[in-house]
Amino acid sequence: MLRRREALREVASKSDAAIERETAYKWAARAVACCQKYAQTGTSHWLRRVEDYRHEALEHAALVGDRGATVRALQDEMDREIKSISGCAAKAVESHSGGSGRRKRSR
């Protein structure tokens, strides 16, 4: 559902950078929440969402335009939060670093 009035107030009262920063932190919180869901359920669906939401968070953080300061701060905060969640940290870090957690088949 589009909340046009709310959006109009937001764009009229906030800078683009503030909107991007808030959006980045919302996506980051979603990534951490999905990590928690993964730790609780073990369902890989949640782990995929961790990475998708993390990516969205970092994209919006990059649009703040502060030479990467928000990207670095947000990345550090997400890493800290994810590492604090038992059962998700190793998988999320592995996923973030490009590892799939699967062994490659030998030919």
Image: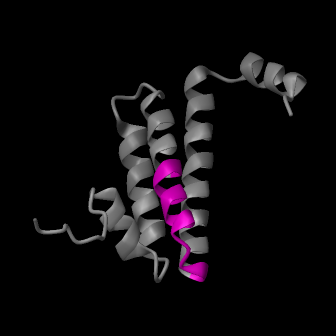
Position of 107 with respect to 43 (left or right) is: left
Q: Residue at x 27, y 58 (%)?
A: 97
x then y, percent, for residue 4? 86, 22
Q: Identify the image quadrant of residue 13.
A: top right
* Residue 21 vs residue 89, the one in the foreground: 89
In the depicted structure, whether residue 77 falls above or below residue 21: below
Q: Residue furthest front?
A: 107
In the depicted structure, whether residue 73 falls above or below residue 39: above
x then y, percent, for residue 28? 54, 52
Position of 105 with respect to 29 (left or right) is: left
Q: Residue at x 35, y 35 (%)?
A: 68
Quadrant for the N terminus, please.
Answer: top right
Query: Total of numbered circles in the picture?
Result: 0
Q: Residue at x 46, y 68 (%)?
A: 82
Position of 104 with respect to 4 (left or right) is: left
Quadrant for the C terminus, please.
Answer: bottom left
SS assignment for the magenta stretch, majority:
helix
x then y, percent, for residue 48? 49, 59
Q: Identify the image quadrant of residue 12.
A: top right
Q: Residue at x 48, y 67 (%)?
A: 81
x then y, percent, for residue 59? 45, 35
The residue segment tinted magenta is 40-53
Position of 34 with respect to 88 (left or right) is: right
